[in-house]
């Protein structure tokens, strides 16, 4: 399952997804569903101060 997830995530890599949409390999709806399903992790953020 890890390989399948890694391959799915690679399809949605912002550096290549527009080309994949243009080539018809994925749809804009697929991209939007992927973005909507992303977990909101802002509560897990820890701010640090660098001096």
Image: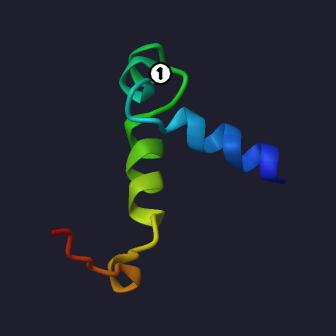
Q: Where on the picture, by quarter, is residue 41?
A: bottom left
Which residue extends farthest front?
51
> Depth check: 47 or 5 in front?
47
- Is residue 6 found left or right of 45 in the rendered image? right
Q: Quadrant of the C terminus?
A: bottom left
The quarter in which the N terminus is drawn is bottom right
Which residue does the image show at 64% across and 42% down from the upper left? 8
Q: Position of residue 48 (x, y in %)?
A: 26, 77
Query: Mark 1: few, some, or many residues within 10 Å (few <14, many ≥20)?
Result: some
Determine which residue is flagged by label 1: 20
Furthest toward the right, the residue is 1
> Which residue lies at the image location 77% right of the left edge and 45% below the top edge?
4
Q: Is residue 50 above or below residue 32?
A: below
Residue at (45, 33) in percent of width and height: 27
Q: Is residue 11 above or below residue 29?
A: above
Instruction: Please provide percent x and percent y for residue 33.
Output: 45, 55
Of residue 34 and residue 39, the one placed in the foreground of this image is: 39
Q: Residue furthest top?
A: 23
Q: Position of residue 47 (x, y in %)?
A: 26, 79
Which residue occupies the extreme left position in the image? 51
The image quadrant of residue 44 is bottom left
Query: On the rendered structure, is 29 left or right of 4?
Result: left
Mark 1: secondary structure:
helix
């Amino acid at each position: 399952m890890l390989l399948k997830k890694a391959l799915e995530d690679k399809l949605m890599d912002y550096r290549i997804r527009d080309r994949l949409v243009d080539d018809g390999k994925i749809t804009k709806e697929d991209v939007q569903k992927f973005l909507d399903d992303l977990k909101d992790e802002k509560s897990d953020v820890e701010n640090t101060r660098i001096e």
